[in-house]
């Protein structure tokens, strides 16, 4: 990764920097409540939510911001304390 002082000048650095290590709260999708509307997927700033038969979260990149839980119309995402 090329850096000038503290600026990152190359695209794609987020693939190397696993932002999930910052997380203090972990989203958990309650599959019995989820209607697969994809709102959480569209609002996630990290792009780490996928739909493969069910909603899944890539915890290597999830920062635990809680936007998915806030935006879910069915309250199907809960935020739990991260166990490290
Ligand atoms: S926003 Fe809620 S109901 Fe919609 S896909 Fe995400 S978890 Fe499921
Ligand atoms: S907590 Fe934030 S980063 Fe993690 S899946 Fe939800 S919206 Fe994405």
Image (cartoon, rainbow, N blue to C red):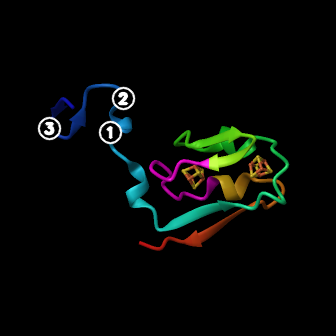
| Residue under label 1 | 16
Label located before the other in sequence (3 or 1): 3
Relative placement, left or right, of 63 versus 71 is: left
The reply to whether dot 2 and dot 1 touch (C-beta < 8 Å) is: yes
Q: Secondary structure at mark 3?
A: loop
Spot the residue most to the left.
5
Q: For the N terminus, which image quadrant?
A: top left
Residue 59 lies in the magenta-colored region: yes
Q: Position of residue 54 (x, y in %)?
A: 74, 46
Which residue shows up at 64% across the image and 48% down it? 56
Spot the residue most to the top.
10
| Residue under label 3 | 5
Q: Position of residue 10 (x, y in %)?
A: 28, 25
Residue range (magenta) = 57-67
Residue 32 lies in the magenta-colored region: no
User: For the residues marked 3 and 1, what is the alpha-carbon distance in whole angstroms?
Assistant: 18 Å
| Residue under label 2 | 12
User: For the residues marked 2 and 3, what is the alpha-carbon distance in whole angstroms?
Assistant: 18 Å
Relative placement, left or right, of 72 versus 22 is: right
Marks 2, 3: nearer the viewer = 2
Which residue shows up at 39% across the image and 59% down it? 22
């Amino acid at each position: 990764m090329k850096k000038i002082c503290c600026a990152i000048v190359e695209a794609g650095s987020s693939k190397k920097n696993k932002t999930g290590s910052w997380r203090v709260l972990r989203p958990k999708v309650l599959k019995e409540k989820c209607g697969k509307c994809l709102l959480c997927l569209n609002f996630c700033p990290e792009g780490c939510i996928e739909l493969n038969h069910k909603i899944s979260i890539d915890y290597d990149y999830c920062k635990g911001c809680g936007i998915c839980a806030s935006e879910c119309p069915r309250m199907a995402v809960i935020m739990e304390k991260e166990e490290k």
